[in-house]
Image (cartoon, rainbow, N blue to C red):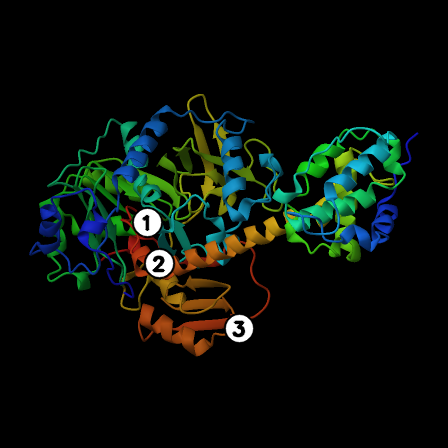
Amino acid sequence: MKLTPALTDDERFPLLSDLSFLKELRQDSCGPRYNFRSGDRLTTECLAKVQHYNEGLKAKAFWRPGEIPSWLPAWLDWCRSTVPAYRNYATSFLQNHSLRREQIARAPWNFVSDECSVDDLLVYNTSGTTGAPMDVLFDPVSQAVWIPQLESILAADDIVIEGGAGRVSICLVCLQESTLTYASLSTYLRGAGVLKINLNPADWNDSHDRISYLEKYNPEILTGDPFTFLALADLAPAIRPKALISSAMTLQTGVRKRLEAQFGCPVYDIYSLTECRMIGVSKRPGVHRLIRPELYVEILHPDHDKAVADGERGEITVTGGINPFLPLIRYRTGDFASLRYTDSMIEICDFEGREPIIFMTVDGRFLNNVDISRAMMEFELAAFTLHQRKDRSVEFTGWGADVSEAEIQRVMQNLFGAAVSCHITIKTDGLPEGKKVQYSSEFNEADVSV
Amino acid sequence: MIAVPTISELIHHIKRCPPEFLAPPVINGKGEVHTEALANDVIRMLSADLTAAKALTLTPDKRSPAELILIQICCWILTHTFFKEIDNRWLNDFLRTQLSAIAPLIKSELWIQDEERAEELARMILKCSGYIPAGETRDESLDRFDSVNTIKRLKVIEESKAAIERAKELRQKMAEKKAREAANVYSRE
């Protein structure tokens, strides 16, 4: 990992005076070898904003079909007067053109409101599972509101996160070659533990510690992607989470059923983006209920900035959010679906965003595509596609000027194993339309094991 | 029917301003032109009442030489026949308050020598008089005034300077370790 901690624990948790539980989580004899430190960095003022946001989530109403939300005109005015990239935007919302990821990636600082203090700036580099890598700017508040958003989802099923010191409330479980891992706390959840762990045995002193550590702290909520959860199910720790929160790729029905049966709790499939965090939640395939009244969702035609007819499929486009370092106006997500209004909610239907893709190393281990995306960051590729056949051979096509087949071959061997059979093509023209990173594979979830 | 001049006609008139109008104004007893007296003479001429009492008090000692010279140049512009035909109630306020901000920004002689500054002055004075230059619509005239407006131009420069500084500051901060040690991540996106 390139990152090294730059703060003290006091800076990471300005409002928490007792950090003994944090030390316990870090120093537990069966704990992983954590490679990073993190905090929520919430000050009194920040915490008040998170709590205020929580109240707003309960109180605010969603917009109605054919209407734009009541908050939007004033919010657009605020963007026009304080955000450099939006200075020339029209006062009428629908007259404004849509925004694409590449525009933000080129100059993210242009999307920061003048009202933001640079001291609150946080940077998250997304490796780009579905697009080119980019720096996403945000602040501690826009990060922490993930928890009230989650609470609002769980509240619909009468599930409550207890929180409080001495209890692990959230555990983000990963299964990657390498990723940042840490034990942390949540100020909003009154000092409860927050873990980010990697199930890769290389991260642990003893591979059985993965089970012991989880069983000891029995997290209230587990978050992760479907494959990681399947790997966790194989490990079968005796834990009783209140809910599993699956994200990053589509959760298939079979996987959901298996996880629900094994862990005895509901499994929620979250549709979220690094650029705006959570958008919707799904409890049945292909249908995501919108959960944020302050994030307006439109379905735009792929080729022009007009909404498609009611019920038709188009590109999911979002406006609003709570991040003053990246307020979004008509931001195209790159995902396609239709929108349906019912009496009580708004739903994203026919969603085809991130089909789960399974890659296998030559020796039969599951390879997370986030590892591939991260490895590709060293090259300046405008786009690439990667397909794996059942015989575990891979076909790679990249678009870029300064990359050689030999370099890609080296990376593929690092990822898939030295014996991997690769067919590599490098192109400089004919850039594909749509997503800049496309993965496909002939493997499926039945092939996954840790 | 009042014949409003075209902008080029008014620019031509400005460029013919006699050098005497640019002579140093009298401030604290020193200088050549009594600006206040000159302005009041012009007002009397426009109202065709040469014996009228002083209508405008400028207190020149409290104004900058640049502003007083610009008032003097405007006195020349007001000798154009157009201003004799219109109601000039706007004039006192114009001379007293509308020139102080812009005058120090431009070297006095440029109002006459430089085509664009002459146009700015012509457009400013017509706008304040409430008339639109001949051959232009209201929107066109406002647009063209915007394009030569010194105060607006400097404001844009000022704003873009500030924007560049801000972007630089954010980029520096983005590179710092503290910002890169982002807050807790709770789920995968």
Task: State the mark number for residue B188.
Answer: 1
Residue A394 placed where, x, y %? 41, 67
Task: Name which residue lies at 21% across and 34% down.
Answer: A161
Residue B29 vertical position relative to residue A178 in the rendered view, above or below: above
Task: Name which residue lies at 31% across and 40% down.
Answer: A146
User: Do the residues under discs 2 and 1 have CB atoms within 8 angstroms?
Assistant: yes
Q: Chain of mark 2?
A: A
Amino acid at dot 2? Val
- Give the camera-side residue of B136 and B177: B136
Task: Name which residue lies at 87% across and 43% down.
Answer: B6
Residue highlighted by disc 2? A370
Residue highlighted by disc 3? A401
Mark 2 crowd level (few <14, some 14–19, many ≥20, 10 Å Cα)? many
Q: Chain of mark 3?
A: A
Separation of marks 2 and 3 at Cα, in angstroms: 23 Å
- Give the camera-side residue of A63 and A82: A82
- Give the camera-side residue of B54 and A209: B54
Q: Quadrant of residue A411?
A: bottom left
Residue A419 placed where, x, y %? 32, 75
Separation of marks 2 and 1 at Cα, in angstroms: 10 Å
Residue A405 vertical position relative to residue B23 in the rendered view, above or below: below
